[in-house]
Image (cartoon, helix red, strand yellow):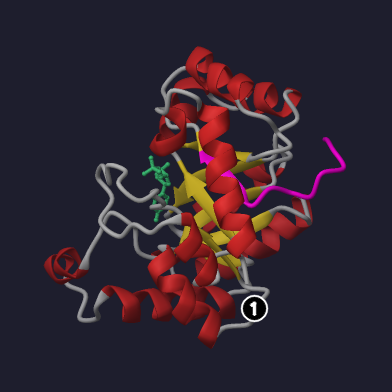
Amino acid sequence: MSSEAPLSKVIVALDCNNENDALEIANLLDPKLCNLKIGLELFISCGPSIIKKIHNLNYKIFLDLKLNDISNTVLKSINTIGKLGIWMTNIHSSGGKKMMLNAQEELRKVQKDCLLLGVTILTSLNDKDLKEIGFQNNVNNQVLRMASLCHQSKLNGIVCSANEAKVIKENLPSEFICVCPGIRALGDDIDDQSRVMTPMLAAKNGADYIVVGRPITRSRDPKNTLTIFKKEFEENMR
Ligand code: C5P
């Protein structure tokens, strides 16, 4: 894998369902300017071969499968994922401390520099949704609670909305990574996201990486839009 340029703080979500579209977007972008996120839709459609093809283009990959199952099943899946040579992956913190500790221990055995993140509360959910599910806490309190559990479980960080990054950075060590989706430029369509933030505010709140999908992949000039998001975020990072 690649370049002397410092690792980009922007992760572009390849949310598509076939290899051609994924490779087309990857070829329009640049591994010196971003890392790529492969999520459930693409991974289920193409299988592990898509990882190899994206690696061949020199990108670092965040494999966003949000694993959530009993500890033994997650551990075995993480063992397989670790062998793919990816940069970052994630599991659901609602799987509990034992599941997270076991997954991290297993990943360290297979690929020690792969980052393991916990998913807290999806950025598509708001306070009302949490109440409906049966959580007593509001989003902020619930995210902090789940983030602390991830930290105690030795995960490298969490996926959270940039709205929550501030409180996470105030309460947990600075090296505990906040990867923040739900990023929009001023005036962008928010699509199905509930809790969105601009790259500048995300940076000021302490986000370490931003995940951007549709605003970049659906723009007329994805590389130019990526450059704008990257500049705004990286120039304002703490
Ligand atoms: O298109 P958009 O910028 O909304 O894409 C956000 C990406 O981040 C999607 O791939 C979505 O699955 C992912 N994500 C999220 N919220 C989380 C975790 C992941 O939006 N909590």
Q: Is mark 1 within 8 Å of ligand 1?
A: no
The residue drawn where x is 63% and y is 57% is 234
Taking the image as shown, residue 238 lies to the left or right of residue 213, namely: right
Q: Position of residue 177 (x, y in %)?
A: 61, 67
Verify whether residue 9 appears in magenta.
yes
The segment highlighted magenta reads: 1-12
Taking the image as shown, residue 21 lies to the left or right of residue 84, namely: left
Q: Quadrant of the N terminus?
A: top right
Looking at this view, is 64 or 210 the one in front?
Answer: 210
Verify whether residue 216 appears in magenta.
no
Quadrant hosting residue 208: bottom right
Q: Quadrant of the C terminus?
A: bottom right
Quadrant hosting residue 45: top left
The correct choice, above or below, for 207 with respect to 152 in the image is: above
The residue drawn where x is 43% and y is 23% is 220
Q: Residue furthest top?
A: 20
Q: Secondary structure at mark 1?
A: loop
Count of picture labels: 1
The correct choice, above or below, for 12 with respect to 69 in the image is: above
Amino acid type at circle 1 is: Ser
Q: Position of residue 166 (x, y in %)?
A: 47, 77
The residue drawn where x is 35% and y is 64% is 121
Q: Main secondary structure of the magenta part?
A: loop
Residue 211 visible somewhere in the drawing: yes
Q: Position of residue 95 (x, y in %)?
A: 42, 64
Taking the image as shown, residue 144 lies to the left or right of residue 125, namely: right
The residue at which mark 1 appears reads as 174
Looking at this view, is 110 or 131 the one in front?
Answer: 131
The correct choice, above or below, for 226 with respect to 124 in the image is: above
Looking at this view, is 22 or 220 the one in front?
Answer: 220
